[in-house]
Image (spheres, rainbow, N blue to C red):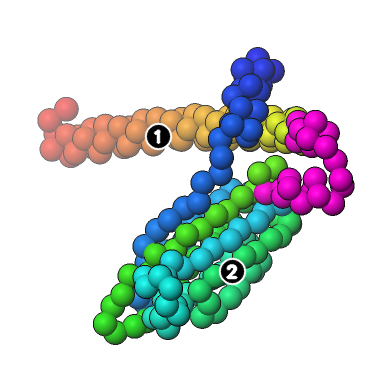
Amino acid sequence: MRSIALVLLPFLAANLFLSPCQSLRFDLKSGHTKCISEEIKSNSMSVGKYSVLNPQEGQPMPESHKITVRVTSSYGNNYHFTDHVESGQFAFTAAEQGDYMACFWAIDHRPEVTVTIEFDWRTGITAKDWPSVAKKGSVDLMELELKKLEDTITYIHDEMFYLREREDEMQELNRSTNSRMAWMSLLSLVVCLSVAGLQLWHLKTFFEKKKII
């Protein structure tokens, strides 16, 4: 596991610093729903913002392009809800680990229209607003980069422990599955032998009654 962590470390760091977070853009028809899931660890920061693209630039947003948004955890807890809006944002610290779901509903409208939504969802270190940190702390560029590096190292360290825990869980699941399969195989063998014994007993009884043997 340590060797894997050493191999992944430069790739994770490069991905965090060099890969810009890109917004997701998707279409949603009137009266339909689309959900997007994100796996978030407990105590991790998560921020998101969304907006409906105006089909008529420079004009007021049509009523047909309003949406309802709800963000929930895998346990059904609500973290964000807005109704009949054209844009919004949310921020929360995950209380439990698991898959979080952001669902978008387009209001029912006749005739049917297609709503284009732009959605940006960030978690962990990517959720931190570094320009605000620099502005509030009055830090220079070098100090800001060092703060980024420190948070990145902490994030990667926590991620390695998280991966190790998941690996241990998978190994335990494999051991449990193998044990159950072994018992099932033994039970199947016992059942087959029992059925074979009953068939032989039945045939022997049948032949004895017919006085063949």
What percent of the width, then of the height, locates residue 10? 63, 21
In the image, 146 versus 92, the foreground residue is: 146
Answer whether residue 132 is magenta in the image. yes
**Figure check: 180 above or below 30:** above
Residue ID at (86%, 45%): 138
Give me the C-alpha separation between circle 2 and circle 1: 58 Å
- The residue labelled by disc 2 is 88
Residue ID at (32%, 37%): 195
Q: Element under label 2?
A: strand
The reply to whether the C-beta atoms of the residues labelled 2 and 1 are less than 8 Å apart is no
Answer whether residue 145 is magenta in the image. yes
- The residue labelled by disc 1 is 188
Q: Element under label 1?
A: helix
Residue type at tag 1: Ser
Residue type at tag 2: Gly
In the image, 81 versus 67, the foreground residue is: 67
In the image, the segment drawn in magenta is: 127-150
Asked whether residue 28 appears in the rendered view, the answer is yes
Asked whether residue 172 appears in the rendered view, the answer is no
**Figure check: 146 above or below 90:** above
In the image, 6 versus 20, the foreground residue is: 20
